[in-house]
Structure formats: C-alpha cells, structure tokens
Image (cartoon, rainbow, N blue to C red):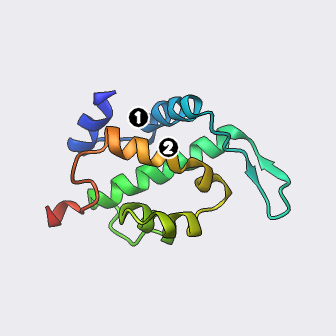
Amino acid sequence: MEEATDRWNENTLEVEDIMPIVTRLAKQERIDLTITDSEDVITKFHEEGLEHVTKLIHRVYRWSQEIHPHRMGSFLTAVVENNLDEAVGKADSVNVCALPIYVKYFYNYAPMRWRTQKSHR
C-alpha cells in the first residue's frame, strides 16, 4: 500500500486509490459505518459510509496539495489540527465511528508533513 503514499507525493492520488485502504481498515477494526438519522433510523448502508470517509480523506489530500485550497469543515479541520476533542465534537454519526480509520490512514499512508499545505512546506 506504499503506492497510496507515492501517489500522494506525486500529486496523483485519487478516491479510487483510497477506497480499498479504507475498506480494509474498517474490516480490521470491525467498524460499522451505517449512516443513521437523528432518530437512529438507518438511512444509508455501510458502503455509503465507507465512500463518505474515503471522500473526506481525499478532501484532506486535495487541501494539503492546494488542489482545493478552500477551508475544510470543522470536523476535518480538527482532524488536521490533531484535536481529538474537537474532532469528536464535530463528527457526524459516521465520522465518530470512523476516527480510527482516519488516524490509521493518515499515520500509515500520508507523508510526514500532510498536515501542512504544500506552499507552507
């Protein structure tokens, strides 16, 4: 899976590169990413939760490479700032369960300086 890190460094990382890693991490951690509404009614299935997490990881990548330099939402900002309290407080029902996936993905597959935008390195 070093290929994902290489693609990040080469500025060619795609959502399709991230999805198999997120899927494997969810299985390893036995994380269910079923999306529910405010009354805990299931509204979307596990695969859509995986897709949601994958797209957010890709959004962080795009932010770090300044491909999409716009501000991220409060949850992703807290993740990038390594602020666990804020991340948990801002996470939706899927992301609160997926926090271990974010941690493992960014630790194992992102370059060391992923928390800084490209122009500030």
Residue 79 position, x and y percent, is 43, 61
Which three-letter amino acid code belongs to the residue tagged 1?
Asp
Residue 107 position, x and y percent, is 34, 44
Quadrant where the N terminus lies?
A: top left
Count neighbours of disc 1 (C-alpha within 10 A) and say few if under 14, some if 14 to 19, many if 20 or more: some
- Position of 115 compared to 54: left or right? left
Which three-letter amino acid code belongs to the residue tagged 2?
Ile
Residue 119 position, x and y percent, is 16, 65
At 21% across and 54% down in the image, what residue appears? Answer: 113
Quadrant where the C terminus lies?
A: bottom left
**Along the line of sight, the residue nearer the viewer: 21 or 78:** 78
- Position of 17 compared to 112: left or right? right
Q: As drawn, which residue projects farthest toward the front?
A: 85
At 28% across and 29% down in the image, what residue appears? Answer: 2
Tag 1 secondary structure:
helix
**Along the line of sight, the residue nearer the viewer: 27 or 84:** 84
Question: In which image quadrant can residue 96 be found?
Answer: bottom right
At 27% across and 43% down in the image, what residue appears? Answer: 8
Q: Which residue is mark 1?
A: 17
Q: Is residue 67 visible?
A: no
